[in-house]
Amino acid sequence: MLQGLYKFSFVTERGTGCGVMFATEGGRLYGGDSGSSFDGSFTSADGVLSAEVRMSRHNHNPNYVPMFDVDHAVLSFTGVARGEEIHFEGGSAALPGVRFQTVLTPINDSDAPPPGAVGPDGIGNGLYSIHIRMLDGIDAGNTGVMMLHDGRIRGGDAYFDYIGANTAANGKLKGELVNREHTPAKG
């Protein structure tokens, strides 16, 4: 059964990429990379996983060049487990002729801090776009996604995963993250 945090890597005729995907016990998928977020669902029958995700661009920086020239697309995949990995193939009507080969590899999140408490008027469960900017004088940053889920933080981008915990109440969020490289970063 698909559940927890995964690194995904994909190959298409247009190039390759990586990101993170969080699968819930209830069959939902949330994830993303440095340019797009993914929101969808999956089912399992007779050893075959079927997934459908909506890809939406979240990085609108004019210097960012996306691999695909659509801001929104629905992707459909079927896959099977090969050891701990899940191997998927699929595509999208919004990207005719583009076939995806995608591999999900589990990310060990056992070293994450315990979940925090979410109180009244706390920032709710969901998938959020995150934009990181360095404040130490270095002109650097990154974009990715974070899934807030019952006091836990799971997320990442094309090269890093984020695991952590958060507390939230009265419109405020306080969190703690562990940031790890899941794919060697360029540069």
Image (cartoon, grey):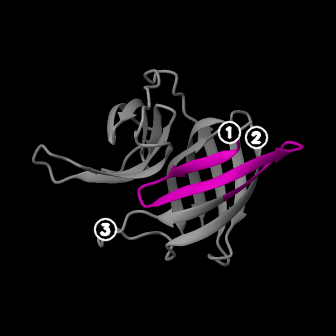
Expressed as whole percent of the image width and height from the top left, the position of residue 180 reads 40, 34
Q: Amino acid at mark 3?
A: Asn
- Considering every residue shown, the one lying at the far right of the view is 46
First reached walking from the N terminus: tag 1 or tag 3: 3
Q: On the image, numbered disc 1 is attached to which residue? A: 85
At mark 2, the secondary structure is strand
Q: In the picture shown, does residue 89 fall above or below 174?
A: below
Q: Is residue 34 magenta?
A: yes
Report which residue position mark 3 lands on. 61
Left or right: 20 with respect to 169?
right
Q: Is residue 46 left or right of residue 38?
A: right
| Relative height, residue 96 to residue 15 (above, below) | below
Residue 154 picture location, percent across and down: 48, 38
Q: Nearer the viewer, mark 1 or mark 3?
A: 3
> Could you tell me if the residues under marks 1 and 3 are in contact, i.e. CB atoms within 8 Å?
no
Q: Residue at x 90, y 43 (%)?
A: 46
Name the amino acid, label 2: Ala
Range drawn in magenta = 25-52
Circle 1 sits in a helix, a strand or a loop, which is it? strand
Query: Cα distance, mark 1 to mark 2?
Result: 6 Å
Badge 2 density bin: few <14, some 14–19, many ≥20, Cα 10 Å: some
Percent coordinates x, y for residue 115 in the rendering: 47, 25
Marks 1,2: beta carbons within 8 A:
yes
